[in-house]
Amino acid sequence: MLSAGGQVLARKRCPTPQGDYEGTLAAVANLVHTVEEAADAQAPHVGIGAPGSVDPATGLHRNANSTVLNGRPLQDDLTAAIGRPIKLANDADCLALSEAHDGSGAGHRCVFALILGTGVGGGLVIDGELHTGANGLGGEFGHTALPRLQSDELRDVRCWCGMLHCLEAWLAGPVLERQWLDLGNDSMRASDIAARARSRSDASSAQAAAVIERWLDRLARALGGLVTVLDPDVIVIGGGLSCIEALYDDLPERIGRYTFNGACTTPIHKATHGDSSGVLGAARLRPRQLSN
């Protein structure tokens, strides 16, 4: 819970009830009431960040990798569960809003925020306001297609959403971990694969370096298109893979290989607020920042 001046008055975390829509509604409502009790105040408004987004045409939730939310009137149901109007936005949008306000994107007019973790998402803030677009799809980076497919990529890679070659199906953390397993290695977290690649400690570090190299090239191709079309002032990266140092050391030069002018000077920064960015951005939501 934030004060009018942006100070954190209270915070609380709880596990997400997996595959349980009604349980998710109850958990969110309980979190709101718990932090209000801790702060001894009622929030003037409630902002919520969630994967996916509301379809402006139907009012139903869509495109969430937490698929139990899809096809449901999530915003209406949360409003009923909490007992007052809420503001709902995509979690990557909330990250972008938080980081543009007082994080790694502060002071920049056009901020693109990228989430790299169990999924892949994006959010866009221009002049301090979320840009969600006429179709409510602004920033849906993870469900654009991997560009410039290489010879070893010319096969059907289907995303959970049903489309082929979504960036989420190529770049998400579990995909990176599966590629490592496919080489005959023991299970390892994506961040540890990246650390192994940098360590040069044993024979497996060369395999790890090859996996990370391919992952970075795919991400660079995707961001090269983004930079060519949008040319943001800064790119901020959050999510569980944001700790991979190569994103900041190597990625800008790689992106330049795939831009129209063959260069990229766009600064790339790690999210200042870490895994708190999304919830801090949600707390800053205002009605005009919503697409519905």
Image (cartoon, rainbow, N blue to C red):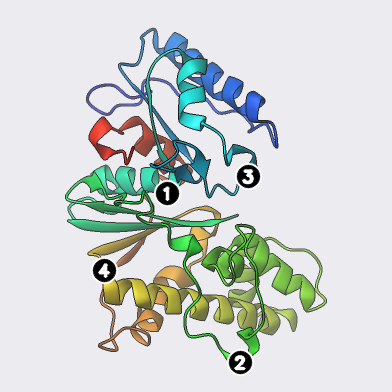
Q: Earlier in the sequence, mark 3 or mark 2?
A: 3
| Residue depicted at x 36% and y 48% | 136
> Are circles 2 and 4 on residues that touch, CB within 8 Å?
no
- Residue occupied by mark 3: 67
Q: Earlier in the sequence, mark 1 or mark 4?
A: 1
**Residue 263 image position (x, y, % from top left):** 28, 85
Mark 2 Cα within 10 Å, few/some/many (few <14, many 20+)? few
**Residue 184 image position (x, y, % from top left):** 83, 77
Q: Is residue 178 left or right of residue 209?
A: right
Query: Which amino acid, by three-letter code, is at mark 2?
Result: Ser
The numbered dot on residue 92 is 1
CA separation, marks 4 and 3?
A: 29 Å
Q: Is residue 55 left or right of residue 150?
A: left
Please name whichever residue, 64 or 276, is drawn nearer the observer in this view of the structure.
64
Q: Residue furthest bottom?
A: 151
Q: Determine if residue 133 is in view.
A: yes
Please determine whether, in this image, residue 288 is positioned above or below residue 32. below
The numbered dot on residue 151 is 2
Please name whichever residue, 91 or 214, is drawn nearer the observer in this view of the structure.
91
The numbered dot on residue 230 is 4
Query: Which amino acid, by three-letter code, is at mark 1?
Result: Ala
Q: Nearer the viewer, mark 3 or mark 2?
A: 3
Q: Earlier in the sequence, mark 2 or mark 4?
A: 2
